[in-house]
Amino acid sequence: MYRLRRALTSVIAASALFAVAACSTSANTENGTGSGTSLTFLTFETPALTAKFWDDSITDALKSVPDTKINKIVSPNTDRNAYAKQLQASGQFPDILSSINPKDFIEANLLTPFDKAWLEENFLLPGANNIKGSTYIPPTNSQILPMVFYNKDVFAKNNITVPKTWAEFMTVVGKLKAAGVTPIELAGAEPWSASMPLVGLMSAHVLGKRPTWVADRYAGAAKFTDADVVAAVTKQRDLIQAGAFGKGALGVNYADANKQFLDGKSGMYLMGSWFIGQIKPEQAASFGSFLLPTEDGSLVVPFNVGGTTAVSAKAPDVAKATAFAKAWSLSPNNLRTLIETDGAFPMMKKLKLEDFGAKVTPVFTEAYTYVTSENTKVSSVGWVNNDDAMPPGVADLFYALSQQLFTNGDVKAQLAALDAAWDKAAGK
């Protein structure tokens, strides 16, 4: 699952994703033969999800949907949600869409749900992406958003152990800074990637104690200005003021942040688990991951079950578009690539990790234990594609807050603005 908004979700992410990164913009292509149905498929490209990946994945899925042509559309950047809206406005809404945020489109009745029997038959958590009882993205895989990746060599050189509490985490920040190492790498140039510390803090420190917080916010029983949220967001300010992020962090893009962290220029990096795919096998021994610590040391997994293919309710042949989307989602070849390159954790009922034949590093297998173990999993705030998704447009404002906190210390006022935006978007 990768979701994918600006990631994205590799979560896939979306999803997941959705993986997120600088996009290439290869040419649109047509796949398939025959004179049958012609469908459009909105894709996006990252260093991990290349043009070849999408072309191969389309070819693989078409084996189950003969006499169909797929016209691949490539989003000009990773914000496929925005591009889908642009296409919608010009009367070209795609028939199949990869890693979008369904909540932005279902109120306009633009998406068609997948049937529950198929979901129950094929996925470990068939209802994980439910929005008001319907699923618009198959729950094929999952991500943890964010994980705290760390450089084992840097930690060892400075006699640092993995922190288990928030206080210990702040101590690590101080030790790394004192050692002349940037404590936390931040891809701050883009809101989605800059949001990772804030997403982690909200997920662990608010939803970890109150998993129903998003539902409560919809019901008016919770606010961003509540004391627990203010305290969590203030921790981001504490990090900024402690010098946890490098100078000029808001000018660092995702690709450069990845390189700087992998080159040992920083000690930690809060990023979606899709980053595992960026760690080469020969580098894996130097890197590990842990969950953002809570005050009392309890483990909270910010979790996102995602998938790729959403289907337009306006497609010229909805049944065939759905058949293609199902075939794409069940293809072991497609998910194997996502496991290897996008750090996607499989959520398939009939296939175990070893069944995919994927080559993964210990960084992957160690992180995967958080998915397979009994623990406290909560929605990754601002990233999920289910009932816990924020109202349309609010996630973008939430991401941007992480950047604003660098220059504006009035946490409560900014959260009050977020409350107002939520109420407006939710029609309160």
Image (cartoon, rainbow, N blue to C red):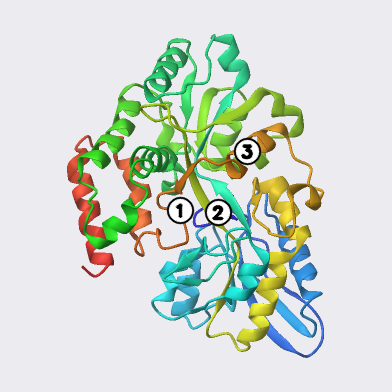
Q: Going 47% across and 15% down the picture, which residue do you hit? A: 176
* Residue corresponding to mark 2: 9
Contact between labelled residues 1 and 2, with CB atoms less than 8 Å apart:
yes
In what element is the residue under mark 1? loop
Mark 1 surroundings: few (<14), some (14-19) or many (≥20) residues within 10 A: many
Q: Amino acid at mark 2?
A: Thr
Q: Quadrant of the N terminus?
A: bottom right
- Quick check: 366 above or below 397? above
Q: CA distance from mark 3 to mark 2?
A: 20 Å
Which mark identifies residue 383? 1
- Residue 206, given in percent of the width and then of the height, sits at 33, 42
Name the N-terminal-most of marks 3 and 2. 2
Q: Amino acid at mark 1?
A: Trp
Name the N-terminal-most of marks 2 and 1. 2
- Residue 80, given in percent of the width and then of the height, sits at 52, 63
Q: Going 59% across and 12% down the picture, which residue do you hit? A: 156
In what element is the residue under mark 3? helix
Q: CA distance from mark 1 to mark 3?
A: 21 Å
* Mark toward the viewer: 1 or 3: 3
Nearer to me, 178 or 229: 229
Q: Amino acid at mark 3?
A: Thr
Q: Going 41% across and 47% down the picture, which residue do you hit? A: 191
Which mark identifies residue 369? 3
- Residue 123, given in percent of the width and then of the height, sits at 64, 62
- Residue 386, given in percent of the width and then of the height, sits at 45, 62
In the picture, measured across the screen, residue 253 lies left or right of residue 73, that is: left
